Amino acid sequence: MKDLMGMMKKAQELQGQMQRMQEELAALEVSGQSGAGLVQISLNGKGEMRSVKIDPSLLKPDDAEIVEDLVLAAFQDAKSKVEGEMQKRMQEVAGGLPLPPGLKLF
């Protein structure tokens, strides 16, 4: 019975840590870029886009397709950084818990 109470306490602590981590991720802002910085996108920790910056040199009617591709590449760059940060923080919170690879807790 003592072990069960200890497990319950650890589960509650983990739940509190997860809640704090989710709040931190919501406040996190990560930038991705493409085209040597000509296009920059910022995402929050939930992967929601917060801003887009496009260098004026790209804003020519004939270059629309290039700009579209660069925006997509910058978004993917920022999104991969958010996912990396989430994974890093999950490892910190989960500590030595044996979580299966690819498990998404939020």
Image (cartoon, rainbow, N blue to C red):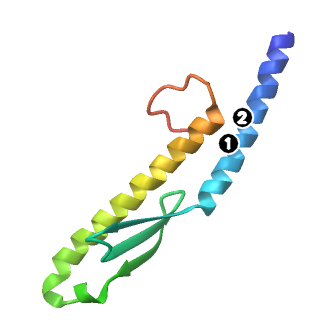
What is the C-alpha distance between the residues marked 2 and 1? 6 Å
Q: Residue at x 16, y 82 (%)?
A: 63
Q: Residue furthest left?
A: 62
In the structure shown, which secondary structural element does the residue marked by tag 1 occupy? helix
Q: Residue at x 82, y 19 (%)?
A: 6
Q: Residue furthest top?
A: 1
Quick one: quadrant of the C terminus?
Answer: top right
Q: Amino acid at mark 2?
A: Leu
Q: Is residue 95 above or below residue 48?
A: above
Judge left or right: residue 8 versus residue 57: right
Q: Is residue 51 above or below residue 18?
A: below
Q: Amino acid at mark 1?
A: Met
The local crowd at label 1, few if under 14, some if 14 to 19, many if 20 or more residues have their Cα within 10 Å, is some
* Rendered image: mark on residue 102: none
Q: Position of residue 79 (x, y in %)?
A: 41, 57
The residue to which callout 2 is attached is 14
Q: Position of residue 54 (x, y in %)?
A: 33, 81
Q: Position of residue 80 (x, y in %)?
A: 40, 53
Q: Residue at x 40, y 76 (%)?
A: 52
The residue to which callout 1 is attached is 18
Judge left or right: residue 44 versus residue 63: right
Judge left or right: residue 76 versus residue 24: left
Q: Residue at x 61, y 59 (%)?
A: 26
Mark 2–mark 1 contact, CB under 8 Å?
yes
